[in-house]
Amino acid sequence: MKKMLTAAAVTLALASCGPETKPPVVTSPAVTSYTLPGAAVYPEGIAHLAGSKDFYVGSTTDGTIFKGTLGQKATEKFDLPDAERTTAIGMKIDGQNRLYVAGGGTGKAFVYDTVNKTRLKVLTTPAATPTFINDVTLTPDAAYFTDSQRPILFRASRTDSSVGDMEAWLDFTGTALEYKPGFNLNGIASTPDGKTLIVVQSNTGKLFRITVADKSVTEIKLGGVGGTTVMSGDGILLDGQMLYVVRNADVIIVPITMSADFAAGTMGTPFSDPSLRYPTTIAQAGNRLLVVNSQFNKRSANEAPETPFTVSDIAIK
């Protein structure tokens, strides 16, 4: 971490800048880890809107939503009571302050107005066992949800003023994306224009490109550092042509430079941080990543978790 400059040093640096020289940019966050209240939170999803100081995190244990503020270490429970939301998995927030929450094994997703603290919509899928609505990405006209147990990609249309019903938009049966035993589709991301979706299949480590216009599904060819797959891939984040994949069990984040058409990617050197604890999903805040520390490994092993549960704030490398 860079050392903080003293006031005198900053003054000297500014004074020495020529007319075409920009002063140095100093980034040293006051908070590098955010705390979540509760002894059994086991968080998974996170939502942050670029330019906002607010972010939201959800508990897989009981669906509690927490609200945090960048630069303030402690988060707080956010008052969004909903008896149907018994868990909270992946989430995103849009420019209309609507929070989209994937409902895991409930087979549902939920949409909330975070300003008025009201539920706007319950997005239901056909009853099925098993099901696990896992993650969500937002495009200019829709919200897309992955299901880790059913080979279906779900979609709900959206405008500035409304959210449509959930539809089974794409059946992966017979495509390049073949569901296997275990946990399949997990994280999902989209290009800003909404024309391309990227998904990760956790149990195979494969990435796939979905072209929205024709619903075509193509495996993304990977190379570079670490082989040709991203096993245990969980949350993903797309920033321009750079894709970040969280590998939860390996406690690393893999940067992947994508080709112009997103058909291939070159993996760079994975990075981590001592604060990470079975990380799941990520959100971007400037030149840093907010990383959710789920501690799912502790729960599955019936071991006591480290408390408080946290969200790490780490530099993008």
Image (spheres, rainbow, N blue to C red):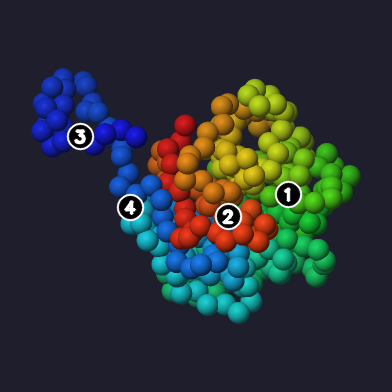
Taking 288 as reference, is 218 left or right?
A: right
Mark 3 or mark 4: name the one nearer the start of the chain: 3
Query: Is the residue under label 1 in contact with that under label 4 (CB below 8 Å)?
Result: no
Between label 2 and label 1, give the one nearer the viewer: 2
Between label 1 and label 3, give the one nearer the viewer: 3
Q: Which residue is mark 3?
A: 5
Q: What residue type is disc 4 on?
A: Gly
Quadrant location of the N terminus? top left
Taking 309 as reference, is 30 left or right?
A: left
Query: Is the residue under label 4 in contact with that under label 2 (CB below 8 Å)?
Result: no
Query: Is the residue under label 2 in contact with that under label 3 (CB below 8 Å)?
Result: no
- The image's mark for residue 162 is none
Task: Tell me if residue 189 comes above or below residue 152 in the rendering.
Answer: above
Task: Tell me if residue 193 comes above or below residue 241 in the rendering.
Answer: below
- Circle 2: element type: loop
Q: Residues within 10 Å of mark 4 (few under 14, many from 20)?
A: some
Q: Residues within 10 Å of mark 3 (few under 14, many from 20)?
A: few
Between label 2 and label 4, give the one nearer the viewer: 2
Q: What residue type is disc 3 on?
A: Leu
- The image's mark for residue 295 is 2
- Circle 1: element type: strand
Mark 1 or mark 3: name the one nearer the start of the chain: 3
Q: What residue type is disc 2 on?
A: Gln
Q: Nearer the viewer, residue 193 or 134?
A: 134
Relative image position of residue 242 (x, y in whole percent): 55, 33
Q: Tell me the CA gap for discs 3 and 4.
A: 18 Å
Q: What residue type is disc 1 on?
A: Leu
- The image's mark for residue 185 is 1
Q: Which residue is mark 4?
A: 71
**Residue farthest to the bottom, as pictured:** 83
Q: Tell me the CA gap for discs 2 and 1.
A: 20 Å
Mark 2 or mark 4: name the one nearer the start of the chain: 4
